[in-house]
Image (cartoon, rainbow, N blue to C red):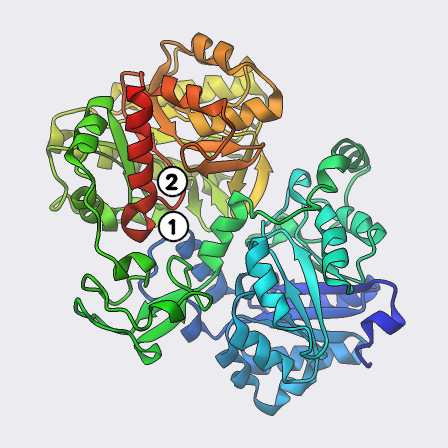
């Protein structure tokens, strides 16, 4: 079948197999047959050479989830070619996504089997990959998720005269909540680039694809699965049958679904996925201070925590200002001298009680950059379950701990889950975290609070608070205080947006007071809740007076834009942030990616918060 998308079909439908085959050939065949019976025009695979996929020293929390899933779901080039022939015999066209131009070579001359190629959102700036696929004389679909308008302009402007290609509107969340679909961006793209536009759907509700069709997209790509509740990261954003109740949800959320006809700003979930799924440059070995990099000194690997193909060249002629270890991302800060933060700011931060989030591997670096005397460990589930060495932990600091949100790559922490394995693993993570907290308390001689995001409601709020209150008080009797965190209306779990139904509305205050629970007041989450539920933050703060035992601080905008730099949100946010500085407890700065570039985001937040406190 000749790939003639725009000539033969009003809207070309691609069923994305992705990693939903779980690395099982027979399951992939079953998905292909299901796609064919569903009447789609094509199926599409993904391929990553495992040696080129992730840096061996990747340390971000999301890495352990994604790298394990990618390895678990691997199919070899030979298997993918065999499956492609199988699909073609069912009169389906076949495409494939690549993440690195080197991976194309794994298919040799058989690369011609594929009818089209796909550039994943995280590789939009990978011009060498796009050029390599363009040269193969096949149609190339290019997803635009997780990038802002300037990056999109730069990538697409270089393609005007380079073969057949289609830009694909995409929100890089898995799944996408109705509030985040931004389908208006389809019209914006069509008008701006004067060409056909597609839609790569990860929506929780497949009906959003119908709205995209109404807006005139010529191609829709969406994941297909045998079971939306299956183990794995992509099943929840794949196609299954839905109930009529979704019709009312579409009607209610239609204005939000159709928003986005403006310059693009990635949401927080996309930025997380861009970091975890995207790539940046890493050194192939240790390099001394003063070294000037050549491209041969570097490898391009996930995660995207440093310089990428868009910005690496401007730094190649500059010497690094500090030594660099293998496995540490190449960032812009390496090429400029670190500006020490003033002693006045350090003293003010100590006086206010400000703290910074750290990982086990970067505590010493953050402490040397910002000796403010207080730090909060943000641990992954693998770290919690490992033997944590306290040898390099300064006993003179104050510490707190943030419980992992996840207990494994596919499940949230939920100590009351009906799934016995999930429940057992959740309680194990809680137990190991409290043991770590107790050891820190022995080391420092002061209490170490543990903050947890408990977000799953199985029956109703009454049962939720009864169960969690009893559990948390049992740990308190053992000497460790676990504090539930005030939650956002929409959370970024597993790279997707999920509505939460507890610890985020005014009605929760009555339950908190009834059970006399301490609360970690997340100012950012409170602002998002105000914007979503339209409650009074003054009333909320007055009602929670006496319950606040810990504070997280960041700015926010809209209903899902969290973790912003202080002062980046609406002007009415600053008085709330200033008020939070007066609580007599640890106050943790949670500006997203504040630790990157030698803590530049944390530095800016410390300066702004101390100034705001003194005003």
> For the residues carrying marks 2 and 1, which lies nearer the camera in this image?
1
What is the C-alpha distance between the residues marked 2 and 1? 9 Å
Picture coordinates of residue 432, whole percent (x, y): 29, 38
Picture coordinates of residue 63, whole percent (x, y): 41, 56
Q: Residue at x 50, y 53 (%)?
A: 273
Picture coordinates of residue 502, whole percent (x, y): 54, 24
Which one is earlier in the sequence, the residue at label 2 or at label 1?
1
Q: Residue at x 52, y 23 (%)?
A: 504
Is residue 453 placed above or below 317 in the rendered structure?
Answer: above
Q: Is residue 225 visible?
A: no
Name the residue furthest bottom. 109
Q: Residue at x 35, y 77 (%)?
A: 295
- Contact between marks 2 and 1 (CB within 8 A): the answer is yes
Q: Quadrant of residue 115?
A: bottom right
Is residue 268 placed above or below 86 in the rendered structure?
Answer: above
- Name the quadrant of the N terminus: bottom right
Q: Is residue 205 visible?
A: yes
- Name the quadrant of the C terminus: top left
Numbered tag placed on residue 61 in the rendering: 1
Numbered tag placed on residue 404 in the rendering: 2
Is residue 187 placed above or below 576 in the rendered structure?
Answer: below
């Amino acid at each position: 079948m000749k790939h003639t998308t725009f000539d033969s079909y009003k809207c070309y439908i691609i069923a994305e197999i992705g990693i939903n085959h779980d690395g099982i050939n027979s399951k992939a065949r079953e998905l292909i047959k299901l796609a064919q019976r569903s009447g789609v025009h094509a199926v599409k695979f993904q391929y990553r050479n495992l040696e080129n996929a992730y840096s061996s020293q990747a340390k971000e929390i999301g890495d352990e989830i994604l790298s394990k899933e990618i390895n678990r779901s691997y199919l070899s080039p030979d298997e993918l070619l065999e499956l492609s022939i199988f699909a073609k015999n069912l009169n389906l066209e076949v495409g494939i996504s690549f993440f690195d131009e080197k991976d194309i070579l794994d298919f040799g001359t058989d690369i011609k089997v594929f009818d089209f190629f796909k550039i994943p959102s995280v590789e939009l700036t990978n011009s060498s990959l796009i050029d390599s696929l363009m040269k193969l004389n096949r149609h190339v679909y290019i997803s635009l998720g997780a990038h802002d308008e300037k990056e999109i302009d730069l990538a697409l402007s270089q393609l005007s005269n380079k073969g057949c290609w289609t830009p694909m509107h995409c929100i890089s969340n898995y799944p996408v909540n109705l509030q985040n679909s931004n389908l208006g961006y389809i019209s914006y793209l069509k008008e701006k680039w004067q060409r056909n536009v597609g839609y790569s759907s990860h929506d929780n509700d497949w009906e959003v694809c119908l709205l995209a069709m109404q807006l005139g997209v010529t191609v829709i790509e969406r994941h297909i699965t045998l079971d939306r509740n299956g183990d794995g990261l992509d099943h929840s954003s794949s196609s299954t049958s839905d109930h009529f109740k979704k019709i009312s949800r579409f009607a209610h959320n239609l204005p939000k679904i159709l928003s986005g006809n403006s310059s693009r700003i990635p949401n927080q979930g996309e930025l997380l996925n861009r970091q975890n799924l995207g790539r940046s440059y890493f050194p192939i070995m240790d390099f001394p201070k003063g070294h000037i990099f050549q491209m041969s000194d570097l490898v391009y690997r996930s995660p995207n925590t440093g310089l990428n193909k868009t910005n690496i060249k401007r730094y190649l002629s500059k010497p690094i200002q500090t030594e660099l270890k293998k496995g540490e991302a190449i960032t812009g800060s390496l090429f400029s001298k670190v500006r020490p933060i003033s002693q006045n700011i350090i003293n003010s931060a100590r006086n206010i009680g400000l703290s910074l989030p750290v990982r086990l591997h970067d505590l010493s670096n953050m402490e040397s950059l910002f000796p403010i005397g207080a730090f909060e460990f943000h641990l992954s589930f693998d770290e919690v379950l490992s033997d944590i060495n306290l040898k390099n932990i300064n006993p003179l600091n104050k510490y707190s701990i943030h419980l992992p949100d996840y207990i494994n790559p596919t499940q949230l922490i939920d100590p009351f889950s009906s799934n016995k394995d999930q429940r057992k693993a959740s309680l194990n993570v809680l137990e190991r975290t409290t043991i770590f907290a107790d050891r820190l308390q022995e080391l420092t001689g002061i209490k170490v609070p543990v903050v947890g995001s408990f977000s799953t409601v199985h029956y109703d709020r009454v049962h939720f608070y009864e169960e969690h209150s009893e559990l948390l008080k049992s740990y308190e009797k053992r000497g460790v205080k676990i504090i539930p965190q005030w939650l956002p209306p929409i959370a970024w779990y597993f790279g997707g947006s999920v509505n939460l139904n507890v610890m985020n509305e005014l009605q929760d205050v009555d339950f908190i007071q009834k059970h006399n629970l301490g609360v970690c007041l997340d100012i950012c989450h409170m602002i998002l809740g105000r914007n979503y539920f339209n409650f009074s933050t003054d009333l909320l703060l007055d009602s929670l007076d006496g319950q606040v035992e810990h504070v997280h601080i960041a700015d926010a905008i809209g209903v899902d834009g969290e973790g912003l730099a202080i002062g980046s949100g609406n002007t009415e946010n600053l008085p709330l942030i200033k008020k939070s500085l007066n609580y007599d407890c640890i106050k943790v700065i949670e500006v997203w990616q504040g630790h990157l570039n030698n803590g530049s985001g944390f530095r800016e937040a410390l300066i702004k918060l101390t100034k705001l406190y003194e005003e």
